[in-house]
Image: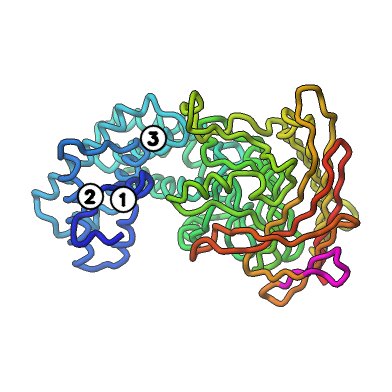
Amino acid sequence: MNTQGRSPFELHPPSAEWRSVLTGFGWLRHMRAANSALARANARALVDDFLASRSRIGALPDEPETTARRVLSWLSQSTLLLEGADSDFYGRFLRGLARDAAQLVQANGALTGLARLQTAIALAEYALCAECPPRFQARTTAQLAAAIEDQILPDGGHIGRNPQTLIELLLDFLPLRQAYAARSINAPQALLSAIDRMIPALRLLRHGDGSLALFNGMGVTAPDRLAVILAYDDTHGDPPLNAPYFGYQRMQAGETVVLVEAGASPPGPYSRQAHAGCLSFEFSSGGDRIVVNCGAPAAGATAAREAVRATAAHSTLVVDDTSSCRIASNVGIERVVAGQIVAGPRNVEVSRSDLADAALLEMSHDGYARSFGLIHERRLALKSDGAQLAGDDRLLGAHKPGQKEPKAFVLRFHIHPSVRLSAGEDGASVVLDLPSGQRWIFEAGALPVAIEESVFFASPDGMRPCEQIVVESQAHAASEAQWAFSRV
């Protein structure tokens, strides 16, 4: 946005998300990277503008998570802001920090979801950096440990199941661990243990090109931020294959990687970014991503963000064009829980086994049981040489009185924009030509195969058109579709 020479804090924000990013001050890291006197002066001027703006009558209060982000940003960029600053600015800066910390202390007891953990991180770091009394330091450390234990799962995932959340939390956890060490104060064991578990969980979700799988709110992978985190990885071994609490599975053979979403919907307050993509998968060969999900769009694209949460935006089976989750609307009584998943898969079964020449993953979910009386069962087999991924999708169960009678199911395989699709000469297959020169063939037995348009939201240069392979058939108990991607 061009501010026409005015302070951005004087403008009416075009969206709540825009304002949150602006007043969270995470963008200060870019000014620090410039490493110049001009960048430092501009950074101080913008902080001063903000401090003046919120003293005006009618200034909008920030959400606690935005305030927490500002506290962390100001603490981490204090060298940028305070080097060469005069005593008046120094005093205003410290008073601004103290005011934000006091607001977080007041709000902390009533917070739920990720905001509670973000606030606990900010208060713990403030207590260390501002040399607060030992009692306040002990209290904030205890609150931090409790929030971590509630939200970081035994396998290192976050309870909200968004891979992006792991990146954001680790970028806060790592400097916080250093802050404890710098003050010669023992960091809570919950923090140390969480870091050790979370980094492998991230590695489980990486494709061969380094990007993270597009599940449950994940959008563009920032390679620089991910590289910072992985620099702290002490294991340097193969990534884990199974994260049962986080709800993700990995299959790998040679350069072929298959990543699968196989978990129940997160609890209400943590589900505002979660998607209806149970049993969806992504698939890559070397540095080429082949099958993907649509991914989450950038901040501000509200309509698109709602659309990509639907099951149809994922590479999985869809019954009667109906999502496997129901997401609360922003009207009527549901406003209280708007954006949360209020019905979805609760019983997700997962079994792994090794065959003579392949790895087998067998899964099922009950997201369609309430509406249609159906269970979706998916089997994936990856050949040991990585040259074929075979799948078998089934619908099990029986239609009951009061439930909708399903008419059709559709298998959707969203294809990365870099892959070129063409119909096979036999009319029953699709040829996939990858940027590396590899060629794969998709087949679905006797079922008709079509190529349709799709959209990919996780490209660094914004939304891109792509294509999807679609297989459609009648939906009823004992419906089955067998398919395979084979390298030629």
Q: Are marks 1 and 2 in contact (CB under 8 Å)?
A: yes
Q: Which residue is mark 1?
A: 22
Magenta stretch bounds = 423-433
Judged from the image, the secondary structure of the residue bearing numbered disc 2 is: helix
Residue 327: quarter of image: top right
Residue contact at pointers 3 and 2, CB within 8 angstroms: no
Residue depicted at x 39% and y 39%: 121
Q: Is 18 placed above or below 220 here?
A: above
Mark carried by residue 483: none
Disc 3 residue type (three-letter): Ala
Residue 395 sits in quarter: top right
Q: Of circles 3 and 2, which is in front?
A: 2
Mark 1 vs mark 3, CA separation in Å: 21 Å
Q: Which residue is mark 2?
A: 9
Q: Dot 3: within a 10 Å radius of its alpha carbon, few (fewer than 14), some, or many (20 or more) residues?
A: many
Residue 245 rendering spot, x and y as whole percentages: 64, 37
Q: Quadrant of the C terminus?
A: bottom right
The residue pinned by badge 3 equals 120
Q: How many marks?
A: 3
The answer to if 424 sits in the magenta stretch is yes
Q: Which badge, 1 or 3, comes first in the chain's sequence?
A: 1
